[in-house]
Image (cartoon, coloured by chain):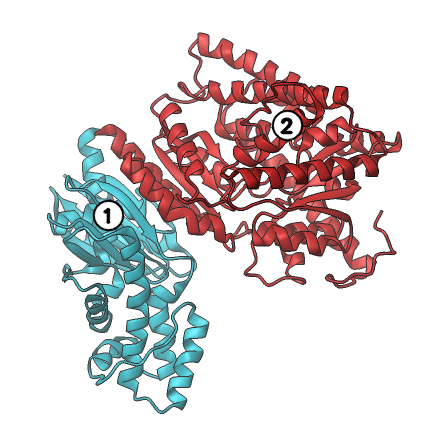
Amino acid sequence: MKSEKIEKKYTPEIPTKEIEELRNSIKTASQKIMAENIERMKKTDPNRPEAMKYFDEIANLFGKRPAEILAEKEKGKKVIGYMCLFAPTELILAADAIPVRVNSGWYDASKVGDRVVPVEVCPVIRSTIGAEMIGLSPFLELSDALISVLTCDGMTKLSEILSDYKTIWGMNIPRVKDSAHSLRFWNDEIKLMKAQIEEFTGNKITRKSLKEAIEQTQKATKAFRRLQDLRKGPPVIMGRDAMLVNQAYLWDDKVRWTEKTEALCDELEKRVQRKDWVCSPETPRVLITGTPMFWPDNWKVPTLVEEANPKGIIVADELCSGERILNDPVGVDEWTMDDMLNAIGERYLMSSTCPCFTSSDGNEDRINWLINKVKEWNVQGVIYFVVRGCMLYGMEYNRIKKALDKINIPAYYLDTEYTREDVGQMKTRVEAFLEMLTARTEI
Amino acid sequence: MITVGMDLGTQRVKAVVLKDDAVISRGQAFSGFDPAKAAEEAVKEALKDADLKISDVVYFVATGSAMDMAPYSNGTVSTMGADAKAGIYLFPKARTIIDVGAEEARAVKCDEKAVMVDFIVNERCAAGAGTFIEAMARALEVKLEEMGPLSLKAEHASSINASCVIFGESDVVSLIHRQESKPEIARAVFDAMADRISSMVNRLGINPDVVLIGGVAKDVGFVASLKRKLGVDVLIPDFPDYAGALGAALTAATRAKEGKK
């Protein structure tokens, strides 16, 4: 599927045989890991909601969903991949194309990326490069073009490197968002992207198709928020299950995902009425923030928290692989094309708490978001997760820590690599943190 | 009531026997390839010393990196939890407990009620821990226990990079090539470690009193460097290497009293 015509400016040529060997070995390992992760989730909650069955199936990155997308492509649909949440998926949907997020959660692929960039670079970036080099990721392979939003340094350079393989559309995002000219600038980027998507797909984005796309995404947002709201009270769903549902939105069919999530919420609401809790309501309530955690490999922190002794439950997160995905709806006043485009621009820029932003008071939106989550979701402790090489999240920690100190919420900085080998060390830390939270609640 | 704490560390397993909240004996063994067996040996040694049998023990608690492998264990406590317990038992006014072991350095902060409120662990690198001194002693061709006294003879401070054991070793080699004396180099090694650990502790914030435990607390050279870098007094108990096991034994006593089995 890879185009032979593009001259590779960044990446080395790897012999086809080596590519196949690498891809097959990582894919085989990955299938085992996905199955194991799901088995462990089932074991943690033996009475898992029926509706999770669907998400377990859709979680198979080499399974049903890529096959469906391939079938759609064969009928002429285009697939547009993206790396950051700023990519306006409503525009992709309105052009009758399929949006998929393509960041790589495969640990082993980062070792392939090491052939191109230094090991100090963020492993999410290295792994995405590696996945592309060996054709590992079905969604990346299926993408006809990629939207790369120039957020952190890693993402900016990632798009250059991936241009060895794919058509890349960069979106230039302002780093200070709370000014009128930033929003104007960004809204222009949105309009350019609309034109680009229309030209590429050959489908005109009409007032009707865009309105439909916005309304469909609003429905998904409603289901998404309903799920998070159900996590406010005594625990009715394990954090990992909710996190998997949230993340599945990134590659699933949007209409079907919305139906299945609503069905899950119906089931959970019945459990709330029966007071059928997923674990003791005394279990320490944890929020995770920091570097995104992509399925399937980078599932180790949620797993550690929910299988620890003493165990914790993840009731909320502030991750761009999690609750940031659909937290905010597009708000339209008048359904004119211009208004809709501006509303999309505003939603993607203004609601984001990504640490690529700064303002006269730092990334205050993120702090406010976190404090609000802590209060409304009754969070007792925050795990601040950073993968080595993720500068922006690492640098923002102290500010966040101080803000949480003020409301007497302990935070722990948990750093890791894209490997499985450090689970032992991380377990010690996670358990000490949970022990601390348990002791605090006993006082 | 007899309780036992086991600390299954990366280099040694330590065991402490507690009778009614007072230490009556200790034992240790090299972890090697079989930490469970080492723990058995350490416990047997300690019990023999106190003239007791396994069956006399009401409650066992394990801690340390291999705690899940511990024999006899009725439960575990995190290394940070054990540090806090031991530090406050040994020095009731202690609020910051620094533990420097073979492979890991960490610090625990407690509030005014002596409850653990925060902790920090060195960033996945042995350069801030005991093995660093071992590697540097090798490079200097001196015995590990000579490093501390040697460093105290240094007349001035030179510096090496302790971001990594391997880089540290090559820095030591360059100092050797610059014909720095062994005492100066030994001091540079401790200064570099103390630098890393004190910046880690400062990130956590210091609540006095400060206690230092862990095997490395026995090294006079490191202690001198750490006091210099932290700029506060550092209290060191007798048998600092047994503090983790003591914390586990104290936890065992608490749990036995609460009737947790």
Percent across and percent down for residue B170 are 44, 79
Q: Secondary structure at mark 2?
A: helix
Answer yes or no: are tags 1 and 2 on the same subunit. no
Q: In this image, B80 relative to A254: left or right?
A: left
Crowdedness of circle 1 by 10 Å Cα count: few (<14), some, many (20+)? many
Q: In this image, B218 relative to A165: left or right?
A: left
Percent across and percent down for residue B246 are 21, 50
What residue lies at 59% left-to-right and 36% top-to-bottom?
A: A36
What residue lies at 49% left-to-right and 29% top-to-bottom?
A: A239
| Visual hue assigned to chain A | red
Residue A32, quarter of the rendered image: top right
Q: Which mark is residue A130?
A: none
Towards the viewer: A13 or A274? A13
In which quadrant will I find the N terminus of chain B?
top left
Which of the two marks, 1 or 2, is nearer to us in this view?
1
The residue carrying mark 1 is B109
| Three-letter code, disc 1 | Lys
Residue A337, quarter of the rendered image: top right
The residue carrying mark 2 is A56
Counting labels gives 2
Towards the viewer: B226 or B75? B226
Percent across and percent down for residue B172 are 39, 81
The chain coloured cyan is: B
